[in-house]
Image (cartoon, grey):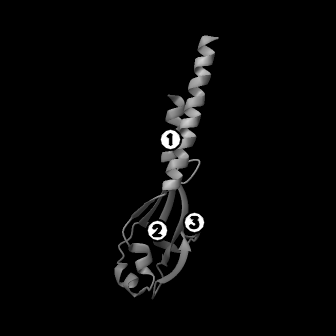
Amino acid sequence: MFVAGGFIWVNTCGNIVITNGIILDLGWPKAAEAKGTETEFQNRPQAQNWFGRREIDYGWPSKLLHTSIPIALKKHEREFYFMDMLREHRDVEDYFVASSKQWVIKGVVINAIVALFVLFTVALLCEYLIRR
């Protein structure tokens, strides 16, 4: 049961693969914008808001599910209207389309075969140790 639980845990923990987006700085008189990752946003002191997509892969030993989620982050809670600025940006559609999930059938089959092999091996090992 511990091995089966381990397989469930390992296949449901996602790995963030890509986080591309738009970094918005609150400047005066005009806010500046730049393309950047979520990490660049966190490391940039003047950056206040980030709009982008998180792409996450699930599965072990092979990728079986790829998800893409739109996300908006704020460093500080401030009243600010972003939509007017975002409408002017040409790449907005890339970041704000709906969430998506893509199943990788080859990955599902590979993961199932590996899991069955390991579980069968553990079952045989346990039976061998019990009957010794």
- Residue depicted at 59% across the width and 24% down the height: 124
The residue type indicated by label 3 comes to Thr
The residue type indicated by label 2 comes to Arg
**Other-residue count near label 2 (Cα within 10 Å), few / some / many at <14 / 14–19 / ≥20:** many
- Residue depicted at 47% across the width and 71% down the height: 50
Could you tell me how far apart the alpha carbons at marks 3 and 2 are, in whole angstroms? Answer: 13 Å
Q: Quadrant of the C terminus?
A: top right
| Residue located beneath label 3 in the image | 39
| Residue located beneath label 1 in the image | 9
| Quarter location, residue 98 | bottom left
In this rendering, the answer to whether 40 lies above or below 101 is below
**Other-residue count near label 3 (Cα within 10 Å), few / some / many at <14 / 14–19 / ≥20:** few
| Residue located beneath label 2 in the image | 53
Q: Nearer the viewer, residue 74 or 105?
A: 105
Which residue reaches farthest top? 132
Is label 1 in contact with label 2 (beta carbons under 8 Å)?
no
Mark 1 residue element: helix
Mark 2 residue element: strand
Tag nearer the camera, 1 or 2:
1
Residue 20 visible in rendering: yes
